[in-house]
């Protein structure tokens, strides 16, 4: 059983190494994710957010504008997740009075 | 050849972190050590996403008065940074719930070893 | 965490550092517009300043700083501030979480600035309350 787990580990490492050969160069400003339009002709989000963030919200920090204004629904979902985790710890560790 | 190594060495370091986390999850017998392995695995995935958002000679995604925002190559891409903030917080919530479940298991079965747990349940 | 450490140096160091860490946490929340920071980072720093005293003091200092029964209403208040801003935008005639329709009298671009600030305060409050709540429940569940 132990050798089976070691085989899984080595196979996973080899698969990830084979997959990382084809990734683009890190830091190249001509990457596909830093372009202006994608392959089908629609706008790419990173390019648009850099150019229009100060214009729309008068805030120098671009990450806060993206988190609080352009993607505010994701942030509200995250608040619900962390609130639910707190309530779960409250409910799981009660003292059972009937036992 | 040197350019290939210069562009890809960051991915290999993150792969080492991935393998350390996976080794901890598979090979250790204590349940707490498996949880620590899961934490290391998650941290390496977050580091991978943040590292692909960088550009050469670019500044942090905060607008400075001396660099114009029309030239996009001056600033880093802000979208992966934002999504990874959410991922970090969700990871913290998951670990809190996981440790609470471990406390419940210990209170009931008096052991945290994987093999003894499997024998006691059956 | 129920027993105290029997050296008074740890308790003195924690009591000395805790207000300054809280002040830096508030600074990180309110300067999220001009430098890296924001709601989540400031909330984690605020929670760290309170957990430091709880770890080093034990059972004696628990009800002195923030009581156990007040963390759940504080977390609900944080989530309610966020949802309240969204519903105020609906009542004023826009979409959900559309900050340009809030009933404060400013230009549309500065209204978005203020809307993001209100949201960051709600996020910081909720994150601090939930982190303290997880620690308190785990301590209470140890001796069941």
Image: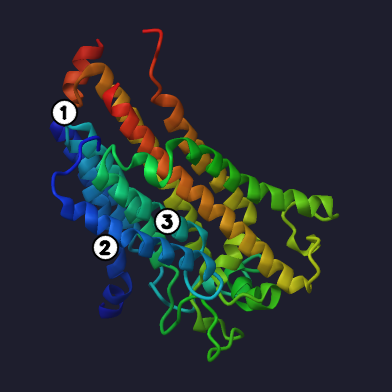
Q: Secondary structure at mark 1?
A: loop
Q: Is residue A48 above or below residue C99?
A: below
Question: Alpha-carbon distance for marks 1 and 3?
Answer: 47 Å
The tag on residue B99 is none
Protein chain holding label 1: A
Residue A69: percent from left, percent from top:
65, 62
Protein chain holding label 3: C
Mark 3 surroundings: few (<14), some (14-19) or many (≥20) residues within 10 A: many
In the image as oriented, which residue stretches furthest toward the bottom? B66
The tag on residue B12 is 2
Nearest the viewer among A69 and C127 is: C127
Residue bearing mark 3: C46
Mark 2 surroundings: few (<14), some (14-19) or many (≥20) residues within 10 A: some
Residue C4: percent from left, percent from top:
20, 40
Residue bearing mark 1: A1
> Which residue occupies 28% across, 52% down?
B18
Q: Is residue C61 above or below residue C124?
A: above
Question: Alpha-carbon distance for marks 3 and 2?
Answer: 36 Å
**Image-based side of A8 in relation to C30, left or right:** left
Label 3–label 2 contact, CB within 8 A: no
Residue C11: percent from left, percent from top:
23, 52
Camera-nearest label, 1 or 3: 3
Q: Specify the quadrant that holds the N terminus of chain A.
A: top left
> Which residue occupies 64% across, 51% down?
A73
Label 1–label 2 contact, CB within 8 A: no
User: Would you identify the image quadrant in which residue C109 lies?
Assistant: bottom right
Camera-nearest label, 3 or 2: 3
């Amino acid at each position: 059983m132990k050798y089976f787990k070691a085989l899984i580990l080595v196979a996973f490492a080899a698969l990830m190494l084979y997959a990382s050969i084809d990734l683009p160069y890190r830091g190249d400003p001509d990457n596909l994710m830093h372009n202006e339009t994608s392959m089908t002709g629609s706008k790419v989000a990173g390019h648009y957010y850099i150019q229009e963030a100060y214009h729309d919200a008068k805030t120098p920090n671009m990450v806060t504008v993206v988190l609080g204004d352009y993607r505010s629904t994701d942030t509200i979902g995250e608040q619900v997740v962390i609130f639910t985790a707190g309530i779960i710890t409250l409910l799981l560790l009660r003292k059972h009075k009937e036992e | 050849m040197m350019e290939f190594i210069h562009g890809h060495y960051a991915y290999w370091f993150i792969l080492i972190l991935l393998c350390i986390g996976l080794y901890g999850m598979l090979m250790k017998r204590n349940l707490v050590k498996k949880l620590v392995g899961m934490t290391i695995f998650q941290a390496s995935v977050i580091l991978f996403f943040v590292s692909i958002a960088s550009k050469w000679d670019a500044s942090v995604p905060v607008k400075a008065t001396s660099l114009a925002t029309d030239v996009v190559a001056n600033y880093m891409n802000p979208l992966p940074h934002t999504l990874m903030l959410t991922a970090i917080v969700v990871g913290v919530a998951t670990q809190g719930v996981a440790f609470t479940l471990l406390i419940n298991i210990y209170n009931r079965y008096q052991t945290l070893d994987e093999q003894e747990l499997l024998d006691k349940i059956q | 965490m129920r027993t105290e450490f029997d050296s008074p140096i740890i308790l003195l160091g924690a009591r000395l550092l805790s207000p300054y860490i809280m002040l830096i946490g508030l600074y990180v929340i309110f300067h999220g517009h001009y430098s890296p920071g924001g709601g989540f980072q400031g909330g984690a720093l605020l929670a760290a300043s309170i957990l430091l005293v709880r770890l080093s003091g034990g059972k004696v200092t628990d009800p002195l700083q923030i009581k156990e029964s007040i963390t759940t209403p504080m977390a609900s208040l944080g989530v309610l501030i966020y949802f309240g801003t969204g519903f105020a935008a609906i009542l004023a005639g826009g979409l959900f979480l559309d900050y340009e329709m809030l009933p404060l009298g400013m230009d549309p671009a500065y209204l978005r600035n203020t809307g993001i600030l209100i949201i960051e305060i709600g996020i910081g409050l909720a994150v601090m309350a939930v982190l303290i709540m997880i620690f308190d429940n785990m301590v209470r569940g140890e001796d069941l």
